[in-house]
Image: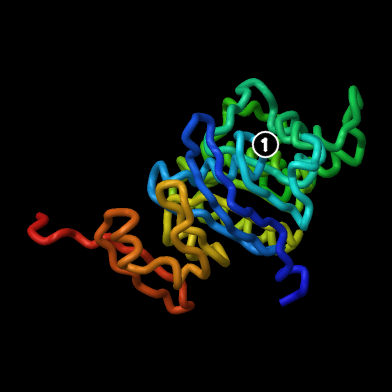
Amino acid sequence: MTGAATTTALSLHEVSAGYGAEPVVRHVSMEARRGRWLAIVGPNGAGKSTVLKAIAGLVPRQGTVMLDGTATDTLSRKELARRVGYAPQNPALPERLTVTDYVLLGRAPHLGTLARESASDLSIVEDALVRLDLAGLAGRRLGTLSGGEAQRAVLARVLVQRTPLLLLDEPTTGLDIGHAQTLLERLDELRREDETTVVTTLHDLTVAAQYADELVLIDRGGVVAAGPPSRVLTTERLREHYAADVEVLTTADGHPVVVPVRTAGAG
């Protein structure tokens, strides 16, 4: 393991965030190591998406967010966009915009006022389209894409920002298992190639355990567990925080698999 892979890329200390008088998340502290994958998990309404928005500076917050040792409060919006790429769970996709033009929007943080895209910007976009198997769809309008194709376009737009940190809110929403697996495999490959730090929210606990190096379990706006998937995903903890009857199995390569258990008398 390289030294870069063990360096803290992102840290949150006592972060509380939300729009109303009562914060959605309270006193959240966590760390993500450079080049690793951190997945934030938890039941519906736990505050997972709000944590990502707090890191990206999209919601009012208190507490400290540090990127490679620099407090985000000291960065301008453009500087933050050069360091953090964020993809919401349900992004607005202009249906008449082509895939190339949409992905090119990701280069905006690197352009000067009124500056036009350079040959270098176009080359970065072309590279992202190739890496995500979108080159053949470059001229297609977003409104004509399938769910999986649109999700890849969203990921491409974030990738062309060339940020050291990616925040992806439920990147597999609406995808079947095959398309979800393909997207996550591509993301993991890109993470390893570029030494990018990835922080995602993921609904599927088994998928989170397969791809993430570490999990942070959030419930009722606070962190209740953090660490390797095998340590976080226990039967007792999932029963307590998800109100679910499950069994946690282990694959041959050591990854936890969360299996629902039917209650007595079902059927």
* Residue 172 seen by the camera: no
Q: Nearer the viewer, residue 52 or 109?
A: 52
How far across and down, in percent of the image, does residue 125 sit? 79, 41
Q: Secondary structure at mark 1?
A: helix
- Seen at 51% across and 54% down, the residue is 40
Residue to which mark 1 is pinned:
137
Q: Is residue 70 above or below residue 158?
A: below
Q: Residue reaching furthest left? A: 265
Q: Residue at x 27, y 54 (%)?
A: 243
Assign the C terminus to one quadrant of the image: bottom left
Residue 224: percent from left, percent from top: 44, 59
Q: Residues within 10 Å of mark 1 (few under 14, many from 20)?
A: some
* Displayed quadrant of residue 186: bottom right
Describe residue 217's horizontal placement relative to residue 77 as left or right. left
Name the colouring of the figure.
rainbow
Q: Is residue 199 left or right of residue 217?
A: right
Number of marks in the rendered image: 1
Which residue appears at 90% of the width and 25% of the height? Answer: 113
Q: Nearer the viewer, residue 225 or 33?
A: 225
Residue type at mark 1 is: Leu
- Above/below status of 221 relative to 184: above
For the N terminus, give its image quadrant. Answer: bottom right
Task: Give the x, y percent position of residue 97.
Answer: 68, 24
Q: Position of residue 160 (x, y in %)?
A: 76, 43
Instruction: Determine if residue 109 is in view.
Output: yes
For this rendering, which residue is in front, 184 or 219? 219
Residue located 64% across and 60% down the image: 32
Position of residue 28 relative to residue 103, above or below, is below
- Vertical position of residue 57 compared to residue 41: above or below: above
